[in-house]
Image: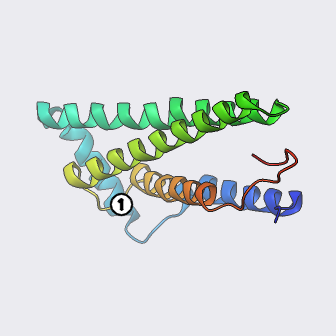
Amino acid sequence: MQISDHMLRSFTVTALAYVFLLPLVSCSSHGEIISNHTSIKENLHKTSPQMTSYIAVHGLILWVSMGFLMPVGILTIRMANKEEGGRRVKVLFYLHAIFQTLAVLLVTVGAVMSIKNFENSFNNHHQRLGLALYVAIWMQALIGIFRPPSDINGGDH
């Protein structure tokens, strides 16, 4: 069962619309959010050294996952799609699977770290976008795991 180009394009457009429009969603407590943001700015210097290190590790883990491992995994599968077949395609496919799995696991570590160590009222765009990306990453991983097998004649890998 192959996904048609039309379905893929419509899904991509819908997903991009959600990603770009999600931060624009406003709620009834907008004034409270602004005052909360102001108080965060005022209390920034009061952040403990331990919290500062948690924030740095959280950012580093998520950057390695989404800024390095995911793109490298995407590039490896793109390289595999250019190959005719054989051992090199298998190696590239397994590298893709390893990079993507590590990326998903690191994203999960970053999310667990966020839930455990940070205030999570989801009243700011960073937290909402992070949650949306976390769900999207796991959806992508599950789609990759449960996709139908590739065609024997060298179609999808």
Which residue: 49% across, 44% down?
101
- One can see residue 47 in this view: no
In the displayed structure, 91 sits above or below 13; it is above
Q: Is residue 102 left or right of residue 17?
A: left
Q: Position of residue 112 (x, y in %)?
A: 29, 52
Find residue 19 and report its image quarter.
bottom right
CA neighbours of label 1 inside 10 A, class few (<14), some (14 to 19), many (20+): few
Q: Position of residue 27 (x, y in %)?
A: 45, 69
* Rendering coords of residue 142 (x, y %): 56, 60
Where disc 1 sits, the SS reads: loop
State the residue in front, 19 or 38: 19
Which corner quadrant of the image does residue 77 belong to? Answer: top right
Q: Is residue 139 above or below residue 44?
A: below
Picture quadrant where residue 80 is located: top right
* Residue at the spot of label 1: 122
Camera-nearest residue between 129 and 155: 155
Whether residue 113 is visible here, answered yes or no, is yes
Whole-percent x, y for residue 39 in the image: 23, 47
Q: Where the N terminus falls, by quadrant?
A: bottom right
- Closer to us: 118 or 90: 90
Task: Identify which residue is drawn at 82% across, 56% down.
Answer: 9
Point 35% across, 54% down: residue: 34
